[in-house]
Image (cartoon, rainbow, N blue to C red):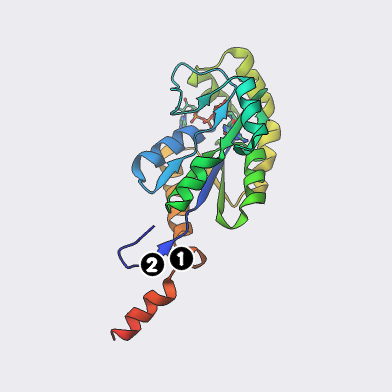
Amino acid sequence: MTTPVGYKRRGLLIVLSSPSGAGKSTISRLILERDPQLSLSISVTTRTRRPSEVDGVHYHFVSQREFDRMRERGELLEWAEVHGNCYGTPRDPVEQALSEGRDVLFDIDWQGAEQIAAAMPDDLVSIFVLPPSGPELKNRLIRRAEDDEATIMRRLTNARGELTHYADYDYVVVNEELQTALAGVNAILMAERLRRRRLVGLENFVETIVEAL
Ligand code: GDP
Ligand code: ADP
Ligand code: 5GP
């Protein structure tokens, strides 16, 4: 990313994880709308499409056969089985975005976060989104009204295990008031973008300042 002052920055990988219904998709959507430096990694999944979802925008919806083919060919940066479906991150768009100096946002589960952390530890920033309470998590899953009852129950059962993984993340954001949670994620992004080790060519930049004194 070229900045007005003439040094560059390496692209960041930002992972948002949470139990289903905590609000990570809502947070991702709003952050992406306002941040042109950020692209969403669009996962492939074998899950059926929800009524509000658009193929190629929220996910690439694929058959199990197509998913297995991608996995076998090494086209996935990471993949995992979550709530009985397969999800994976296509490798090419991530590498393309990073090479163009853009940051990439991932809405993936803890297993995916672990795999990306192992592959690219220096570039990863991980954020765990917590719901404000157990009853509120239930309410949100029910209110979203996009999954059938058995799916909601399965996701609530899985939430217990998923919640234990907050401890492996760099940051934790409680999504009680949406605007406050958004401000938290934006603050993390801004601070991480300013980390000195991500800035390339800083030495030359400082030299030009010194020379012009
Ligand atoms: P949500 O929990 O309501 O966002 O439901 P989704 O169906 O969108 O996601 C289901 C689970 O799969 C979540 O735990 C996601 O974090 C996870 N997930 C989504 N995309 C990926 C991916 O590309 N890789 C992996 N490993 N997990 C993913
Ligand atoms: P996830 O992607 O983590 O499964 P969603 O983003 O789909 O969660 O959010 C689940 C439901 O909760 C959605 O109906 C969403 O509109 C709602 N929601 C998200 N954040 C908040 C919030 N801060 N307060 C109230 N409702 C919220
Ligand atoms: P949903 O089915 O509600 O869209 O997603 C369920 C879970 O799968 C969420 O926790 C979501 O973050 C996760 N998920 C979605 N795509 C991926 C992916 O590509 N990889 C991994 N590891 N998890 C994913």
Question: In front: 114, or 205?
Answer: 205
Q: Position of residue 47 (x, y in %)?
A: 58, 21
Q: Is label 2 within 8 A of ligand 1 (CB to nearest ligand atom)?
A: no
Q: Position of residue 30 (x, y in %)?
A: 39, 37
The answer to whether residue 84 is left or right of residue 186 is right
Q: Is residue 177 visible?
A: no
Three-letter residue code for mark 2: Tyr
Question: In front: 95, or 16?
Answer: 95
Of callouts 2 and 1, the N-terminal one: 2
Instruction: Check residue 7 in the rendering and tell me which mark sits there, or answer none.
Output: 2
Q: Position of residue 103 (x, y in %)?
A: 45, 49
Picture quadrant of residue 206:
bottom left
Q: Which residue is mark 1?
A: 199
Picture quadrant of residue 149:
top right
Residue positioned 41% across, 47% down in the render: 183
**Above-or-below relation of 69 to 4:** above
Where's ligand 3: which quadrant? top right
Three-letter residue code for mark 1: Leu
| Quadrant in which the C terminus appears | bottom left
Residue positioned 50% across, 28% down in the render: 59
